[in-house]
Image: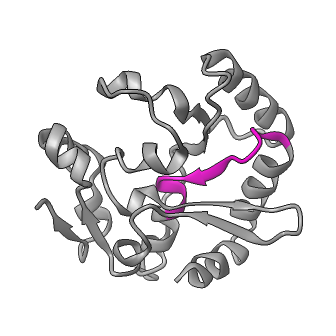
Amino acid sequence: MHQRVAALMMTDPFAMQVLAAVRDHGPQGAYVAAGFVRNRFWDALYPEKPPLPDADIDVVYFDACNRGKAADITFETNLDKHMPTGLWQVRNQARMHKFGGYPPFDSLDHVLRHWAETATTVGLRLTARNDFEFVAPFGFDDLRYHILRITPMMKQHDRQGFDARLDAKGWLTRWPNLEVIRD
């Protein structure tokens, strides 16, 4: 499955520019994740409908030694200087436990398990050798089979938040064949 995601990204010049910019000018070890990956893959399932522009570019990394927001802002500014999009959202996931009232996270994989939907947790990055590396704590099946599934942590702590995201983002309008699994 990861080969299909990689192949899709390689045919998207903008996506490849984003991945190269993050590799060259973003935080060390960062991935591009969330809607940037999910939307491209699911939009490709609907060739009759042109893909919508990116609302943001989610760049995620984990640095337990520097949890301040200032570093994220510096990375966003640096990325926008090298690739002006105004869409960069760089977030050190080592501090994201504060938003959900969780104990500190210990890795990027640990954080992603607390995100809202399983398909959204797929991230990728471009290596120095122009290979793709992936992070996918729940695997690729929900991305592949066009399933929006609530994560166990979201189900336990904020089931209403999942429904609110589904409604607010208009995903069933954008992807009418999307299977939604709340349990």
* 61 displayed left or right of 55: right
Please give left or right for residue 181 compared with residue 135 in the image.
left
Residue 63: image location, x then y, percent: 65, 32
Q: In the figure, 122 relative to 152: above or below?
A: below
Q: Position of residue 68 (x, y in %)?
A: 62, 16
Q: Quadrant of residue 49?
A: bottom left
Say whether residue 160 is magenta: no
Q: Residue at x 54, y 51 (%)?
A: 54
Quarter assignment of residue 11: bottom right
Residue drawn at x 44%, y 61% is 137
Frontmost residue, 137 versus 52: 137
Q: Residue 138, located in which quarter of the rendered image?
A: bottom left
Residue 109 versus residue 133: which sits nearer the camera? 109
**Magenta segment, which residues?**
25-37
The question of residue 28 being in magenta is answered with yes
Can I make out residue 158 in this image? no
Residue 164, image x, y percentages: 18, 41
- Image position, residue 60 (x, y; %): 59, 43
The colour scheme used here is one colour
Above or below for 58 versus 48? above
Residue at left offset 39%, top offset 21%: 98
As rendered, which of 134 and 107 lies closer to the eye? 107
- 33 with respect to 104 (left or right): right
Residue at 80% x, 51% y: name it: 23
